[in-house]
Structures are given as C-alpha cells and as structure tokens.
Image (spheres, grey):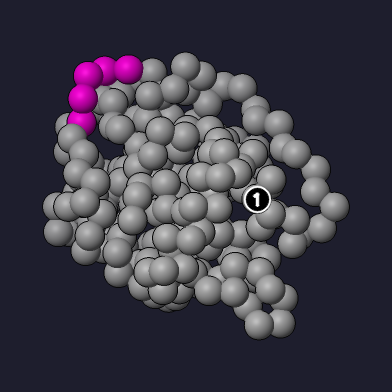
C-alpha cells in the first residue's frame, strides 16, 4: 500500500462518520474559548472553497474525491483497487458505495504507520498545526517543550517544526474536511508520540471513527 491509500481511506471514513452524524466527542467543548466557535477550527488563513454536490453519494465519486484530496482520478482509482485487494475496502451491497473496514484501519494506524511512513520534526516553518498542537489533541495532552508541529503550508496560521504529512496533498485535503483534519493530526500524534501520548491519541481517534 501507498501513503495516498491511507489518505483515501481516512477520507472515506470521514464521509462515513459525517453521513452517520457521529458527534466529534474527541474535542471537549469550551464556550469561553474562541477556538471552539464554528468556523474557527482552521489552522490556515484563507478559507477553502467547497464544490457543491447534488447528493451525498456524489461525495464518493472519483471526481469529488479527486477534488477533495488533490489526487488525479487515476490515482484515486488505483488506490481504491489496492485497498480492495488488501481487504480494507469493500462495497456496500445496498448502496454500492465504498465502505472502509474501520477496525483494521485503526490497527494499521496504531501499529504500522510509524514504521512504514516514519517522520521526524524538521526546521521551523509556517504551516498547519498537527499532532499535539492540533485541536483534536491539544486540550487533552501537552507536548514537551514550546515548539509545535506543523504541516508546511504557505497560508498556515502557525510557526512550528515542519512535519512531512502522510501524503503531500494532506494540507489541501484537510482544508475541505474538518473531520479528516482531526483524523490525520491524531495519526501524526501516534506516529510521533511516546507510548502514553500515542495511547491518548489512539483512544480519541477510535471514538472519532465510531469505534469507541
């Protein structure tokens, strides 16, 4: 499998979660914190435009996934084929829409990604907060030191140590999907953290994927 396959799988899990109206319980609400107000979750300065869709099922089309993830239609198609071959992706009998094996994807996030796609903090850059600095985790645990981790991005709202995202189009993809942003930031915390930090991130991710 390739890293863009993991990106695609988490995108479709995000679509599943939103379709099932799963509450994002992993982020404690704080009415006194401006960051909890609708529209203020972003880690970038310019809002991303969304492409209108005629129906929810259109979100799973090659065209929609290509636009949302910054991948070509052929890349999406090839990634789907690899995911089907690995058993991580099937098609719903009633709707015909792709369906992710969420439990197996969670196991991969817990045990495999930090070895298959290792990452280390780099130089200071402007970017989008990830890992312990992202909203999904920043209120649950603090990283050691004052430096935060970011995905390098020209319109990112913070400066921190650069972390190479799981795939190069992640900064584009998360600007269109709040839930996907939280998933991938938590995946980074699992890839980068020690046992305690990774455990906290894993439990939050599990809840957000509807597996808690």
Toward which corner of the image does residue 128 lie, by quadrant? top left
Q: Percent position (x, y) of residue 54? A: 85, 52
Residue shown at 49% from the left, 52% from the top:
78
In the picture, measured across the screen, residue 176 lies left or right of residue 172, that is: right
Q: Is residue 31 above or below residue 209?
A: above
| Residue 153 falls inside the magenta stretch | no
Q: Percent position (x, y) of residue 170? A: 45, 38
Q: Percent position (x, y) of residue 179? A: 54, 52
Q: Is residue 187 above or below residue 149?
A: below
| Quadrant that contains the N terminus | bottom left
Q: Which of the pair 75/102 is nearer the observer?
A: 75
Tell me, yes or no, if residue 129 can be seen here. no
Q: Percent position (x, y) of residue 65? A: 62, 48
Q: Is residue 39 above or below residue 153?
A: below
Q: Which of the pair 71/210 is nearer the observer?
A: 71
Residue shown at 75% from the left, 39% from the top:
51
Toward which corner of the image does residue 23 lie, by quadrant? bottom right
Q: Which residue is mark 1?
A: 62
Q: Which of the pair 102/161 is nearer the observer?
A: 102
Residue at the left extreme, as displayed: 194
Q: Secondary structure at mark 1?
A: helix
| Quadrant that contains the C terminus | bottom left
Label the magenta part by its dominant secondary structure: loop
In the picture, measured across the screen, residue 163 lies left or right of residue 21, that is: left
Span shown in magenta: 121-125
Tell me, yes or no, if residue 126 can be seen here. yes
| Residue 122 falls inside the magenta stretch | yes
10 Å crowding of disc 1: few (<14), some (14-19), many (20+): some
């Amino acid at each position: 499998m390739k890293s863009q396959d993991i990106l695609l799988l988490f995108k479709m899990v995000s679509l599943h979660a939103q379709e099932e109206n799963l509450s994002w319980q992993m982020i404690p609400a704080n009415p006194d914190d401006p960051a909890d107000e609708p529209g203020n979750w972003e880690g970038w300065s310019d809002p991303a435009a969304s492409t209108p869709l005629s129906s929810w099922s259109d979100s799973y089309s090659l065209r929609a996934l290509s636009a949302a993830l910054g991948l070509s239609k052929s890349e999406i198609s090839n990634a789907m084929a690899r995911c089907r071959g690995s058993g991580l992706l099937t098609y719903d009998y009633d709707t015909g829409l792709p369906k992710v094996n969420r439990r197996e994807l969670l196991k991969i996030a817990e045990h495999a990604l930090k070895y298959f796609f290792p990452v280390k903090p780099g130089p200071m850059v402007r970017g989008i907060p990830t890992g312990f600095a992202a909203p999904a985790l920043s209120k649950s645990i603090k990283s050691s030191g004052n430096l935060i981790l970011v995905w390098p991005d020209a319109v990112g709202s913070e400066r921190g140590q650069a972390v190479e995202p799981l795939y190069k189009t992640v900064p584009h993809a998360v600007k269109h999907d709040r839930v996907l942003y939280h998933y991938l930031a938590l995946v980074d915390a699992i890839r980068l953290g020690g046992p305690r930090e990774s455990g906290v991130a894993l439990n939050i991710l599990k809840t957000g994927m509807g597996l808690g």
